[in-house]
Amino acid sequence: MGRKKGETRINSKEEYVGISEILEQKGISRRDFMKFCTAMSAALSLPATFAPQIARALDEVKRPTLVWLEFQDCAGNTEALLRSANPTVAELVLDVLSVDYHETIMAAAGHQAEDILAKVVKEQKGKYIAVVEGSIPLKDGGVYCCIGGRSALDIAREVCGNAFATIAVGSCAAFGGIPAAAPNPTGAVGVKDAVPAATVLNLPGCPLNADNLTATVVHYLTFNKLPAVDSLGRPLFAYGKRIHDACERRPHFDAGQYVEAWGDAGHRNGFCLYKMGCKGPATWHNCPIQRYNENTSWPVGAGHGCVGCSEPVFWDSMTPFYKRLPHVPGFGIEYTADKLGAGLFVGAAAAFFAHGVVKAFRHEIEPSEQSRKEGEK
């Protein structure tokens, strides 16, 4: 991933030039840079007041090296990356990260490419970030996915095992995805199951929202630590709320207004898609908030129900996709709005507890609660 002449991020004093300065040289204003930082604070579920702190971190912290591995995948997450807007892929590759290895977009090939990967693993052990796209087959010694004469399992153990952290992008890398659907002929699994000792953050979705990947890296650069995760290893800022709770069609659900058939009046008027198979009540993701295509839309907004692609084994557990869920914890589709309102709080609390969010927040709340009690003495 070479830079053009004059684009180096290191000055004569061997200090790293901040992103804002580099972008300014390219004609991107400080205001646009701060808009990006504000967008990242929103993606991380932080107040807008964190934008200056994010800006300082991006300007002052050395960019981490990143290697991107592709195994049993359709390259959909790479496609999502190439179409990302916050920042554009050029800015992501050249300025935010040092992407030293990515089979699809790197210029090198063959032995030269593999030598680059080996050099990163050897010289930056415990310092680089690995991104994995696609599931890893375990059956028959992993022969169903080989790169450069080595199995995906062997490569993952070496690269992910020596990385500071591994980010599993997409549902295949996180949970095995469609390759792991029954009967799973290749023995496909997610990264954590293949390399249990590795530090893995899961960013499931089919494909992932590239903004969540950028936000994960920005969180690390800003706070010098990885974001808090749920029991499935998913960052809470992106997977801490159910799709159903932030959906723009939720008011129609509460009012008992549903699409009964594709193309009917309810469908044309944006009614709830629950009866058409929407899995939003059982899926945890920030799709309604972060959206896709430069934050313009997302599947439910476009008129198609959620298929639950950020959940484990969704291909098996969420099918048939066009049939409604048989049961939603805390409320039922047949409830009236009055009955729903009475039971909603209890159901939501139970769902959050099962998800592990309460446990994650308790760690942050307990110190302040203890301080309060001491102040009352």
Image (cartoon, grey):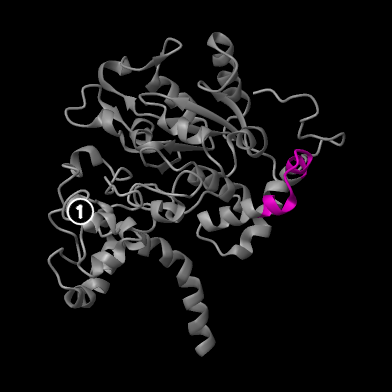
In the image: residue 375, left or right of residue 337 = right
Q: Residue 272's image quarter?
A: bottom left
Residue depicted at 23% across the width and 38% down the height = 315
Q: Residue 49: percent from the left, percent from the top? A: 63, 65
Please identify the dominant SS of the magenta region.
helix
Q: Is residue 309 visible?
A: yes
Q: Is residue 377 visible?
A: no
Tell me which segment is drawn in magenta: 21-34
Q: Residue 11: percent from the left, percent from the top? A: 83, 35
Q: Residue 260: percent from the left, percent from the top? A: 16, 55
Nearer to the camera, 308 or 292: 292
Q: Residue 297: percent from the left, percent from the top? A: 42, 49
In the image: residue 19, left or right of residue 362 = right
Q: Amino acid at mark 1?
A: Asp
Q: Name the element at disc 1.
A: loop
Q: Pointer 1: what residue?
A: 264
Residue found at the far bottom of this picture: 377
Residue depicted at 54% across the width and 28% down the height = 67
Nearer to the camera, 357 or 40: 40
In the image: residue 270, left or right of residue 228 = left
In which quadrant of the rendered image does the N terminus lie? top right
Residue depicted at 29% across the width and 59% down the height = 269
Residue depicted at 20% across the width and 56% down the height = 259
